[in-house]
Amino acid sequence: MFKPISFVCAGILAALTPVALSAPSQEPAPAQAPAATPAPVANYPKNPIRPTAESQAKAKNIYQIDCAVCHGDNGNGKTDLATSMSLTLNDWTDAKTLADKSDGELFNMIRNGKDKMPPEDPARAKDGDIWNLVIYIRGFSKAGATAASTAAK
């Protein structure tokens, strides 16, 4: 009626042997497709976002986490890290610095990176967040102009 245990164990061992004792595959794992780089935003001559207090607060938070370490809390580009990396960064508190850059160009630099500046990860900042970040960065020169005119009085 009952099969001896050794017979059952031998059957299980025989069933598992090809899998358990086979050599691991030496074939390389298939290469994963690189993450798609977002296309440049050439068709946005102007920023399509209307900022809100909430969206600008989020942009400020993203800036503080991802940008300020190199570009400075106020956007002047004078940080210890930039100096240690021998980087000369633009001073965004000077309105002339960004005057010849469109919002689309700034968006592309932030999203895709430039030179030693890494790209902003789409998982961390959606396109709307980047557009708000452009507005936030442009605000550095306005804040600088307001501070300068107040100091001159």
Image: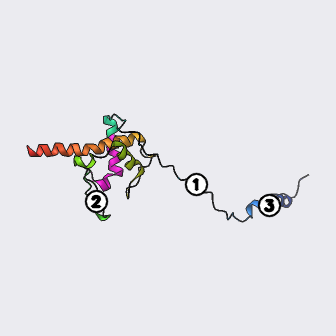
Magenta-drawn stretch, dominant element (helix, strand or loop) = helix
Tag 2: amino acid: Thr
Which circle's residue, 1 or 3, is located before the other in the chain? Answer: 3
- Pick the quarter of the image with the C terminus: top left
Q: Nearer the viewer, residue 111 or 67?
A: 111
Residue beneath disc 3: 13
Q: Is residue 39 magenta?
A: no
Q: Is residue 100 left or right of residue 27?
A: left
Q: Nearer the viewer, residue 47 or 73?
A: 47
Q: Nearer the viewer, residue 100 or 69?
A: 100
Which one is closest to the eye, mark 2 or mark 3? 2
Residue beneath disc 2: 88
Q: Is residue 64 magenta?
A: yes
How far apart marks 1 and 3 lie (CA) works out to 36 Å
Tag 2, which secondary structure?
loop
For image coordinates 41% across by 39% down, the residue present is: 43
Question: What is the magenta range?
Answer: 57-74
Q: Is residue 80 above or below residue 95?
A: below
For image coordinates 32% across by 34% down, the residue present is: 52
Tag 3, which secondary structure?
helix
Residue beneath disc 1: 32
Label 1 Cα crowd, 10 Å radius (few <14 / some 14-19 / many 20+): few
Tag 1: amino acid: Gln
Residue 133: percent from left, percent from top: 34, 43
Residue 138: percent from left, percent from top: 28, 44
Tag 3: amino acid: Leu
Image disc number at residue 130: none
